[in-house]
Image (tube, helix red, strand yellow):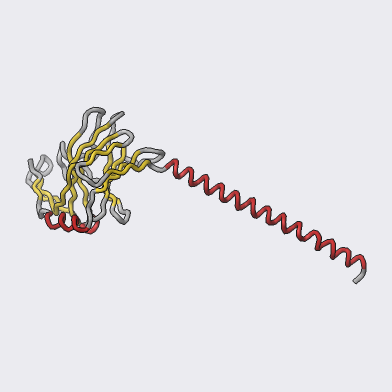
């Protein structure tokens, strides 16, 4: 090999490590940017997450959120309800469900401004059952679904849930203000109903085939 060719090869070898260090520097900078981006996303998710407030599994339970308070007094299971007729349906009738009815007797109160509280049942495997609508069952003055609340005027009644029997064990009752899931520091009150396997069997054994809800 001639002297010029040897000199050129030596110069190329001297330049090669510098290109490798430059590539490594760009890779490191890119990784640092990805880590910072993910950390920012995590911080945003934490700021946007609801404020989970847990209540103990002892009845009666009083739990307070950011703009509301709820009292959970007792609950029971039934397979169907017997309801009194009304103008739309004059005769008494049965209200059935593919699963069972879980009724939760309690009280809701607005603390700062008018509105209403939404209740939902969250099972141990993460399924959510929102409280039944005001016409299932249609019980004026009792069904707390979408009940208008005013500060200083607590409303008593019950929430009703249609739930499969095998979802009772480990279920938690959750409450939040308004109709949309809470975010940005709003309260999500979580009440452990304390339904273990034995309690679930007991509830089902004591469940009435028809629970009379007529006045």
Q: In screen coordinates, is 183 left or right of 76? A: right
Regarding residue 128, the answer to whether it shows in the image is yes
Image position, residue 46 (x, y; %):
44, 44
Q: In screen coordinates, is 15 left or right of 37? A: right
Image position, residue 109 (x, y; %):
24, 33
Quadrant location, the C terminus: top left
Q: Residue at x 7, y 45 (%)?
A: 91
Regarding residue 93, the answer to whether it shows in the image is no
Q: Residue at x 22, y 41 (%)?
A: 61
Image position, residue 12 (x, y; %):
82, 62
Residue 148 location, quadrant: top left
Furthest-bottom residue in this view: 1
Residue 100 location, quadrant: bottom left
Does 128 appear above or below 151? Answer: below
Q: Residue at x 37, y 38 (%)?
A: 186
Quadrant location, the N terminus: bottom right
Does 206 appear above or below 215? Answer: below
Q: Residue at x 7, y 46 (%)?
A: 92
Does 21 appear above or below 1? Answer: above
């Amino acid at each position: 090999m001639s002297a010029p060719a040897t000199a050129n090869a030596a110069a190329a070898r001297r330049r090669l490590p510098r290109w490798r260090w430059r590539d490594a520097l760009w890779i490191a900078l890119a990784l640092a940017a990805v880590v910072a981006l993910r950390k920012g996303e995590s911080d945003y998710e934490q700021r946007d997450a609801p404020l989970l407030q847990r209540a103990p599994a002892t009845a009666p339970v009083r739990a307070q959120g950011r703009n509301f308070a709820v009292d959970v007094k007792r609950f029971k299971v039934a397979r169907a309800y017997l309801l009194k007729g009304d103008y739309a349906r004059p005769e008494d009738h049965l209200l059935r469900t593919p699963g069972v009815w879980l009724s939760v007797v309690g009280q809701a109160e607005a603390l700062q401004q008018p509105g209403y509280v939404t209740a939902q049942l969250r099972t141990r495997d993460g399924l959510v059952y929102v409280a039944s609508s005001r016409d299932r069952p249609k019980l004026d003055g009792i069904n707390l679904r979408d009940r208008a609340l005013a500060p200083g005027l607590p409303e008593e009644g019950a929430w009703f849930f249609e739930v499969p029997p095998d979802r009772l064990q480990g279920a938690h009752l959750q409450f939040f203000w308004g109709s949309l899931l809470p975010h940005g520091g709003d309260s999500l009150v979580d009440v452990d109903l304390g339904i273990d396997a034995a309690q679930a069997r007991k509830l089902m054994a004591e469940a009435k085939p028809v629970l009379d809800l007529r006045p």
